[in-house]
Amino acid sequence: MKETPVFQIVGYKNSGKTSLLSDLIAYGAEREEKVAAIKRHTHEEPLKVMHHETDSYRLHEAGSFMTGVDSPGRFQMELSHQEEYALDRLVFLYRQFDPDLIAVEGFKNESYPKAVIIKREEDLELLHTLTNVQVVITWNEAMTEDVPFLVIALNDWRKRLSEVYRIAKGEEDHER
């Protein structure tokens, strides 16, 4: 059995990661594939508990480090932890649910295949420091004309989603 592919979309703050990831997930969902998402939250403020003032919130507040709520057609989980979980550990957990693709926002320094968003000229350094770059999404094509990766202009992103989705799933070889 083939392992579920993992594909990251990375870039600096406000570069468009969430929007592009949402498009990629919607593309897979339209094809009736199960796409799972992992998002890195690097902001200083803590995440809010998913269900404030519900039974699951009460259980979480009572001290449960992991609270799951299952209902017809949906399962939600709240997991509290002191140490940061490595992406590999989260991927392992997600793979238990047999998704067709695990789409990840962030975790720049992980080695999974990735698309890198280049918004500003200083972002180009990411292409020298990150591993397994498959696609570069650029806000300005002139900045990336000498980049040795497949480059997609932000304006062409939606037109090329089928290509990016195949790359994300490891189904397509790509050249510049």
Image (cartoon, rainbow, N blue to C red):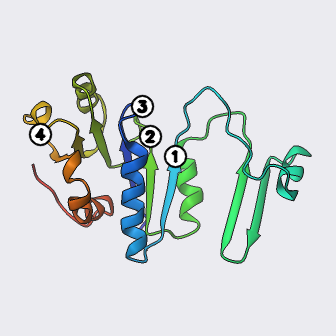
Q: Are marks 1 and 2 in contact (CB under 8 Å)?
A: yes
Mark 4 nearby-residue class (10 Å; few <14, some 14–19, many ≥20): few
Which mark is drawn over residue 148? 4
Residue 13, numbered circle: 3
The label number, if any, that marks residue 29 in the structure image = none
Taking the view exactly as shown, the residue that stands out farthest to the right is: 62
Q: Amino acid at mark 3?
A: Lys
Q: CA distance from mark 1 to mark 2?
A: 6 Å
Location of residue 143 in the rendering, given as x and y in whole percent from the top left corner: 13, 30
The mark that comes first in sequence, 4 or 3, is 3
The residue wearing badge 2 is 106
Per the model, the C-alpha gap separating discs 4 and 3 is 24 Å
> Which amino acid lies under the numbered mark 1 shown in the image of this protein?
Lys
**Amino acid type of the residue tagged 4 in the rendering:** Pro
- Total labels drawn: 4
Q: Secondary structure at mark 4?
A: loop
State the residue in front, 6 or 19. 19
From the top left corner, tell me how far across and down residue 101 is, in percent. Answer: 42, 64
Q: Residue at x 9, y 33 (%)?
A: 142
Is 33 placed above or below 66 here?
Answer: below
Q: Residue at x 52, y 51 (%)?
A: 38
Q: Of discs 3 and 2, which sits in the foreground?
A: 3
Q: Secondary structure at mark 2?
A: loop
Residue ranking furthest to the top: 122
Residue 81 falls left or right of residue 84:
right
Residue wearing tag 1:
39
